[in-house]
Image (cartoon, grey):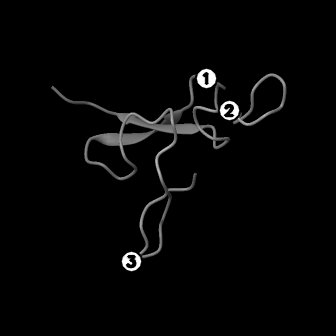
């Protein structure tokens, strides 16, 4: 999943199963995937199902 610098007029990448918010949603940001610790892989070498192999998830930040 690559949500960095999308081309104007193109939709953002779909959310990964571990995402807590839609890409680009206000009050959200990228974080290291807690399931794979940012590697994008499971111990057996297969892609992490939470981040779909990117090593990043979208989560809520800040708030009150």
Per the image, the residue denoted by label 2 is 48
SS class of the residue under badge 3?
A: loop
In this rendering, would 52 be left or right of 29?
A: right
Per the image, the residue denoted by label 1 is 35
Per the image, the residue denoted by label 3 is 9
Image point (40%, 50%), residue name: 23
Q: Residues within 10 Å of mark 3 (few under 14, many from 20)?
A: few
Residue 63, position as x, y percentages in the image:
20, 30
- Looking at the image, tell me whether mark 1 or mark 2 is earlier in sequence order: 1
Cα–Cα span, label 2 and label 3:
29 Å
Q: Residues within 10 Å of mark 1 (few under 14, many from 20)?
A: some
Residue 61, position as x, y percentages in the image:
32, 33
Question: Is there CB contact under 8 Å for labels 1 and 3?
Answer: no
Cα–Cα span, label 1 and label 2:
7 Å
Vertical placement of 31 versus 54: above or below? above
Residue 54, position as x, y percentages in the image:
64, 43
Q: Residues within 10 Å of mark 2 (few under 14, many from 20)?
A: many
Vertical placement of 23 versus 32: above or below? below
């Amino acid at each position: 999943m690559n949500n960095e610098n999308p081309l104007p007029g193109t939709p953002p990448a779909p959310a990964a199963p571990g995402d807590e918010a839609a890409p680009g949603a206000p009050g959200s940001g990228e974080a290291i995937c807690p399931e794979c610790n940012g590697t994008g892989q499971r111990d057996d070498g297969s892609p992490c199902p939470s981040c779909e192999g990117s090593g990043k998830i979208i989560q809520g930040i800040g708030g009150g």
